[in-house]
Image (spheres, helix red, strand yellow):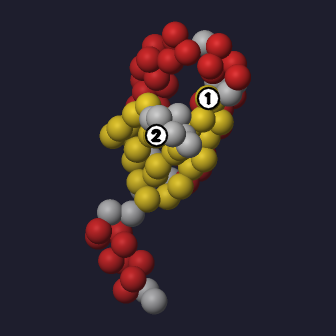
Amino acid sequence: MKFVTLVNFTDQGIRNIGDTTQRAAMFTQQAEAAGIQISELLWLNGRFDGLIVYDAPDVESASTMMLKLAQSGNVNTETLPAFDAAGMQNVVEQL
């Protein structure tokens, strides 16, 4: 299953901004060890501070990993399921 997680820094995350790329590398390693494949991990300017695009085996795995990320205290997350064209076609065909 594909997911997109929107990320915003907390006050702690802003104070620790110098470590953001190292934290991202550690997160990527932990996610991959949990069977989650990170496609994109991007920093943004605007309403959100970051974006993670990934494949997870199921909703529970994705939720667990994002809750672990949020537990660090550096970010808040909002996770959304995402569909490629084939996945969206399957949804449409069920209408």
Instruction: Identify the residue at image location x=65%, y=13%.
Output: 15
Asked if 66 appears above or below 28 in the picture, the reply is below
Quadrant including the N terminus:
bottom left
Give coordinates of residue 40: x percent, y percent: 35, 38
Q: Image check: 68 left or right of 90?
A: right
> Does dot 2 land on a helix, a strand or a loop?
strand
Please provide percent x and percent y for residue 89.
33, 77
The numbered disc on residue 9 is 1
Residue 54 versus residue 75: which sits nearer the camera? 75
Mark 1 element type:
strand
Q: Is residue 63 left or right of residue 73?
A: left
Q: CA distance from mark 1 to mark 2?
A: 11 Å
> Residue at label 2?
51
Residue 27 makes an appearance in the image? yes
The amino acid on which the numbered mark 2 sits, given as a three-letter code, is Leu
Rendered image quadrant of residue 25: top left
